[in-house]
Amino acid sequence: MTDRRTELAGNLARVEERIATACAAAGRRRDEVTLIVVTKTYPASDVRLLAELGVRQVAENRDQDAAPKAAECADLPLTWHFVGQLQTNKVRSVAGYAGFVQSVDRARLVTALSREAVRAEREIGCLIQVALDAGSGERGSRGGVAPDGVPALAEEVAGAQGLRLDGVMTVAPLSGTYAGRQRAAFERLMEISSDLRAAYPAANMVSAGMSTDLEDAVAAGATHVRVGTAVLGVRPRLG
């Protein structure tokens, strides 16, 4: 365990240096960017070590992994982000532990999240997942609503009990206009964020960038980066 703690500490330090360097290059303050560590496929013991090392924001993309891990780490001062495609039959479970759902992409999901947030007497921060590979009225290959669907979905979230409209999220697309153009994709997300903030000034979170492209996200203006592999290493899927 001591070796693993040392490994995680070193990885975190390298990621921190990357973020700090990217902020400096973009003329941004380091405190403008929040690191979220994506702990998918890794055990609760790693989450505990990360918490010891000062990590406070963690993310998961599958409820079957996240729910038991969140329960096991319930004594820790952590905020859990759900970042994967969320099926409505998993919403009750996710609403029990997630402080944020970053993958809101359809009205039916908003309705389900609102119902379960009220039931759990919690407020859940919601980010609208934007699919930059989706045409008008479509969903993206990895979830998300097309850019022109953001205003209507934002109105749904803003009017829903138990939910808080906090901003937008994207995953760099693998196909379409922005494939292989992460910086351009994240800059487009910032434009969408700007339009959203004109109507909802408090919805100022922009979640973009992962281990391979966090510098592009910081340069574009992201407020949150979601880093897994660069912190935790490469590990085969559990189960």
Image (tube, rainbow, N blue to C red):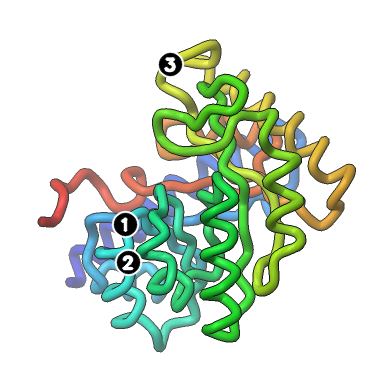
Secondary element at image label 1:
loop
Q: Which mark is residue 62?
A: 1
Secondary structure category for the residue under label 3: loop
Mark pair 2, 3: CA separation? 29 Å
At label 3, the amino acid type is Ser
Tell me the tag on residue 66.
2
Residue 52: quarter of image:
bottom left
How far is mark 2 from mark 1, CA to CA? 6 Å
Residue type at numbered disc 1: Arg
Quadrant assignment for the N terminus:
bottom left
- 213 lies above or below 168: above
Residue 157, image x, y percentages: 69, 57
Give the distance between the C-alpha atoms of the residues marked 1 and 3, in whole angstroms: 23 Å
Where residue 86 appears, x then y in whole percent?
41, 54
The answer to whether mark 1 and mark 3 are in CB contact below 8 A is no
Mark before the other along the chain sequence, 1 or 3: 1
Residue receiving disc 3:
175
Q: Please give the name of the residue rendered at 60% of the width and 29% of the height, measured from the top-left corner.
A: 146
The C terminus: image quadrant: bottom left
Residue at the farthest left position = 239
Crowd tier of the residue under label 2, counting other residues whose Cα lies within 10 Å: few below 14, some 14–19, many 20 or above: many
Please name whichever residue, 162 or 99, is drawn nearer the observer in this view of the structure. Answer: 162
Q: Amino acid at mark 2?
A: Ala
76 up-or-down from 39: above or below: below
